[in-house]
Image (cartoon, rainbow, N blue to C red):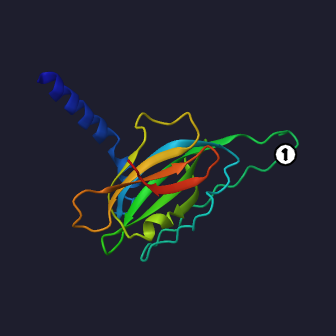
Amino acid sequence: MAPTLFLRAGLVGLMLASGPALAEDIDQLPVTATFVISGGAWEGDAEPLPTVKPVAPAAGDTAAPPPAAEAPAATAETAAPAVRNGYYKLIAIRQPDRTAKVYLQQILSSETGPQVLESVELEEFTTIRPYVTDIRPEDSTGVSRQPGFFATVYLKTDPAQLEPEGWTVLIDEFGEIRVERETN
């Protein structure tokens, strides 16, 4: 029992030591964000996510959307452009009627930190007005070495529904997005 208590005390001390910087960052997250996961990987020229409507700011949201990253300017010394890479984020945002909208972001990993390249609303979810109960990545071991993204969104189309439905969000190695109901 003592080692567990020591471990907990150590974690609390670690959290307190890094608290102020984290508190400022976490306060920027909207309270309506019910689920946020990161995962997958992409590499290349970082073209915007295809065929999906861009995210509009929510009503009453005064924060401006993060600026899209710009491609580095080509110079005589750079024969080939630098390879850019990053990951994806899937986010459920609760609406006033308790349903959710689901957004997908393409994140650029850069020397100055992560940058949002593109945010899109996944219309497949918006049209069914879901009550999102969970979002899970395919893999929780960290950054993927394989290109693409896979996650499961668990939702109910009626709040009285007993069991949630599973819907998959898949981005293949070419950047094509598929959203479909799981079929087991």
Give x and y (percent) for residue 89.
Answer: 48, 51
Q: Is residue 21 left or right of residue 65?
A: left
Specify the farthest residue to the bottom: 59
Give x and y (percent) for residue 55.
Answer: 53, 67
Q: Is residue 31 above or below residue 169?
A: below
How many badges with numbers are in the image? Answer: 1
Q: Which residue is mark 1?
A: 75
Give x and y (percent) for residue 119.
Answer: 55, 60
**Residue drawn at x 66%, y 50% as measured from the top left:** 46
As rendered, which of 29 and 98 lies closer to the eye? Answer: 98
Q: Quadrant of residue 127?
A: bottom left
Q: Quadrant of residue 116?
A: bottom right
Give x and y (percent) for residue 28.
Answer: 41, 59
Specify the farthest residue to the left: 1
Specify the farthest residue to the right: 76
Quadrant of the image containing the N terminus: top left
Q: Name the secondary structure under disc 1.
A: loop
Tell me the amino acid under the disc marked 1: Thr
Specify the farthest residue to the front: 184
Circle 1 residues within 10 Å: few <14, some 14–19, many ≥20: few
**Residue drawn at x 82%, y 48% as measured from the top left:** 74
**Residue drawn at x 62%, y 63% as measured from the top left:** 51
Q: Quadrant of residue 95?
A: bottom left
Q: Is residue 180 left or right of residue 109?
A: left
Q: Is residue 91 above or below residue 112?
A: below
